[in-house]
Image: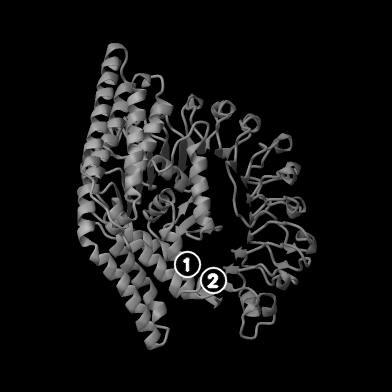
Amino acid sequence: MAGSFVTLFQWRLNSVLLQENEILLAVKDQILSLVNKLDEVGSFLGHPVFWTLHAREMAESFLKLFEPYLKKKGNDEMMSLIRQLDEVTRVAGDVERIRACCQTWVSELRVMLHEAEDYVDDFIIKVYGQTGQDRKESIAEFGSELENINSRVSEIMNRRPRLGASPILEEIQQFLKSRFAFDEDDEETALASCMLNYINLPYDLKLSLLFCCAFRVYHRITKGALVRVLVAAGLIQEKPGELMEDKAQENIEKLMDLGMLQYCCTTDCFGVRSPYYELSLSVMNAEDFFISSANSDSIIPPTARHVSIHGAENTIPNMNSLLHSLFVSAKYGLSKPSPDCWETVLYNAKLMRVLDLENTQLKSLPDEVGKLVHLRYLVVSDFKITELPESISNLRSLQTLDIWSGNEFELSNGVLNLAQLRHLKMSRNVNGEVRVPRGISRLSNLQTLEGIYAGGGIAKELGNMTQLKSLEVRCVSDDHADELYASVMNLTGLRNLSLILDSFSRSIDLDNKEDSIFLFLESFSPPPLLETLELVGRLTQMPLWLGSMENLTRLCMACTHLSENPTTILQFLPNLKSLLLRDAYKGKRMEREFFRAGGFPKLEYLEIISYVLVEWTEIDKGALPCLKELHFNGCWRLMGLPEGLQHVATLQKLTLKDVHGDLTRRLNPNGGSQNYKIKHIPLVESYALSCGWTVWKT
């Protein structure tokens, strides 16, 4: 981890060569020479002795995490384990001389390379606005500065400390391997295995894990948001012919496979699992991270590059001029940071790349936002905001613009100047759409476009945006629906699609004539690579093309109020893993044919929300062979769960939220007549407004 800042600077230089090849052809040799020099630096920083920079924190974290399990053991064995862990901590303390020497040297190198990285970014922005002789002079100056940076790196390397063998990493690994047998079913050995996984985690994955921790633990981050912030923060290496977003998603999946990230199907969000969250926190200060639980008493270290403040009140601490990332979530029900406060913060942090604000109660962002010319990621989640400053058009480096706004919000023409924009996500109030300016298709790097209104010619324009991966259109109406569907069929690379009608309801009046109906869908053909689909609004019949979507993994059908069984078509989808049926079917009974043997071969998550459903009678034995989670939400008339549910052996969780009281009594483990249907499920949760959550089994 000590060499991460070196590698990130190398990635930035390689990215410059890819993106600015024509402009920087004259200095290509200087850049390549510096990259090679950084290879030498990175090799040296890979020496095990550099674990001493945060070895004590790691060892103390181990001791703290093991303590609850050690107390369960007999006194003699517990004391023996504690002594061994204390010895690991002592070894970390014995290397203080080497630690101090290395820390001073690494700090000097880090400061110099951070300054160099900021200089490179400043130059790229400057040269974009130049032509002719001015550009030539700037490039010549840049070449001279690159040679100067190379010389400074060489000079620092000549003063590198002499390193001997560092026992700390071997001590920790040896302790964990020799003392525990690594039985996955045993809490203590499973914890030791987690620690070894963390120690041996590649630094790029460890950096990704640290950034996950920047989001408050009770506010999990979606996969899409995590991908976008990792790219914007420069934690993903850019390679020719590859999307950095694809590499970021690959890193996330690796962390999931290692059990370090936990995925929630209900919210499509991630959270860092314990003990990895605690271990990550132990090294954050050593890696220029800082986490604050309350802003009023916080002192931001002068070297911090990434700051996350949870529970902000009426002030924000002074920020240093080196800040690259700032995450702020304000407390609900308390006074919020004032606009003047934000102006000061943003004025000081001119090098900021990532800015994520939640519940700040700002009606508009300060004009200073437009001066953050390095900004790549801007997220504002606050329904009070009604506008963006005109200066937003200055953010030529912006990759992500994600605004959860108020009722009166509209997007100005200034967004068309954001040539590097890759992700545009908009939401107005709860279900409102945002109007985007004509000419939106000029943004040729745009991969995500969500929350928009497609009327006024925008529907036709979407057909030219063949680079789109994710599209959400709200307030779909008859006047542009046919053009919209034709455009979507042209987006052959689209992976995520959401279509929401201009009016829909959960009304008990299922034949409400005022609700709009999806028209022209019979002529629609979905893009071949589509993985997630959301349809919100009434359907007269099930679209037959749904049954041919072989790549579909996630489907949401809401307020469709179908009179026919939707699963007749859906159960043959070969890769569907998540299915949400929210008032999708207006029948009162679900019979055996809804879930036949062999149907939904890969479905892991099923959620049913229905005001009218009274009974689900039976499912075939062998149906839902991979189901892990089953959720009923708002099914307040539902009287019984199906016969055959007891044969779904893969079920791990059942949630009953706002269901009929008779159903919960019949399923209750204390004498419930239908408890046999669910007693094999490890976790059963029931929620009623009058008594809150009840956990029956864990």
Vertical side of 172 occupied by 10: above or below: above
**Amino acid on which disc 2 is placed:** Glu
Q: Are marks 2 and 1 in contact (CB under 8 Å)?
A: yes
- Disc 1 crowd rating (10 Å Cα; few below 14, some 14-19, many 20+) is some
Q: Position of residue 264 (x, y in %)?
A: 53, 59
Q: Quadrant of residue 655?
A: bottom right
The location of residue 465, given as percent across then percent down, is 55, 28
**Of the pair 8 and 97, the residue shown nearer to us:** 97
**In the image: residue 207, left or right of residue 306:** right
Q: Is residue 303 among the parts visible in the rendering?
A: no
* Depth check, front residue: 154 or 250: 154
Can residue 347 be seen here? yes
**Looking at the rendered structure, which numbered label has been put on residue 193?**
1
Circle 2 packing at 10 Å, graded few (<14), some (14-19), many (20+), is few
Left or right for 510, reference 207: right
Look at 21% across and 61% down and name the residue there.
Answer: 96
Picture coordinates of residue 216, whole percent (x, y): 37, 57
Q: Which residue is mark 2?
A: 184
Which percent across, then down, holds residue 620? 78, 66
626 lies left or right of 404? right
